[in-house]
Image (tube, coloured by chain):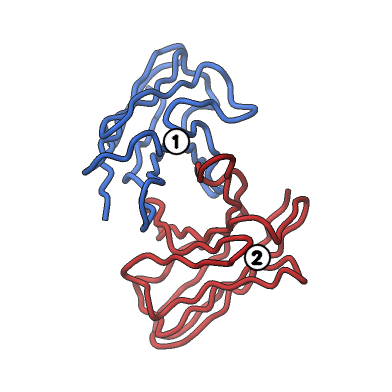
């Protein structure tokens, strides 16, 4: 399993970025996928998730309306569209694969992360 | 949202020590709790899921217990590679939440 994030970088407040996560080594189309972020020197913060089959989406309450998660199963790629970015969105953003057997039990594979810096 | 509070936030221990980290949930989450280990600059590694089930490939010195609102992660005999930051995560209800983390340093 490999998860490779890209698209991070430097952006001014109010700007937008789209993160991508290229997945390989598993059946991407049927797997639940997650974005988790970590501000510099801080803990983990769950951002958003998307289901496999019906592609139901879930968001942290504080991010609803600004961030949109999506997937392209033909490209084995997960996305996170981030709009109206704020300084507090500065973080390393991780893509992760959901671990689901008879229930959702967490994330069993993680990417290396991509850094987003929001600053004027 | 369900709040998770880990204790302690910082822990200093020696090789061979037995250590326990506690995670308390603000409401009943049954057994929908996972534990992760994170080393500097890397993504987290899943250690325990379902509160007490060891994830594949994780050494047996790691164990988890608890249900409802109180959970523990125990490392029975610390090894040099165990010095890292540990997080609990609840998967009972959206939004998913993490504890604030416990940093485990070598004494």
Residue B35 tag number: 1
Judged from this view, the residue extending furthest toward the left is B26
Quadrant that contains the C terminus of chain B: top left
In front: A117, or A70? A70
Colour displayed for chain B in the image of the structure? blue
Judged from this view, the residue extending furthest toward the bottom is A14
In front: A117, or A68? A68
* Pointer 1 chain: B
Residue A106, how many percent across, how many down? 50, 44
**Label 2 residue SS:** strand
Residue B32, how many percent across, how many down? 40, 39
Quadrant that contains the N terminus of chain B: bottom left
Residue highlighted by disc 2: A21
Q: Look at the picture and state if A78 lies above or below B8.
A: below
In front: A8, or B105? A8
Q: Which chain is red?
A: A
Residue plotted at (71% across, 64% down) = A22
């Amino acid at each position: 399993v490999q998860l490779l994030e890209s698209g991070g970088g430097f952006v001014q407040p109010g700007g937008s970025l789209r993160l991508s996560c290229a997945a390989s080594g598993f059946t991407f189309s049927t797997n639940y996928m997650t974005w988790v972020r970590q501000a510099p020197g801080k803990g983990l913060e769950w951002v958003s998730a998307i289901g496999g089959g019906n592609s139901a989406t879930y968001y942290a309450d504080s991010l609803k309306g600004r961030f949109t998660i999506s997937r392209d199963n033909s490209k084995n790629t997960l996305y996170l569209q981030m709009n109206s970015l704020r300084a507090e969105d500065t973080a390393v953003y991780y893509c992760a694969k959901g671990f689901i057997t008879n229930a959702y039990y967490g994330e069993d594979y993680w990417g290396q992360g991509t850094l987003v810096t929001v600053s004027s | 949202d369900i709040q998770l509070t880990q204790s302690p936030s910082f822990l200093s221990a020696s090789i061979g020590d037995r250590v326990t980290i506690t995670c308390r949930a603000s409401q009943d989450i049954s057994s929908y709790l996972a534990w992760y280990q994170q080393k500097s600059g890397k993504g987290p590694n899943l250690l325990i899921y379902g509160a007490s089930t060891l994830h594949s490939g994780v050494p047996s010195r790691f164990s988890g217990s608890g249900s409802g609102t109180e959970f523990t992660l125990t490392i029975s005999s610390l090894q040099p590679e165990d010095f890292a930051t540990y997080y609990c995560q609840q998967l009972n209800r959206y939004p998913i939440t993490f504890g604030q983390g416990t940093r485990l340093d070598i004494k």
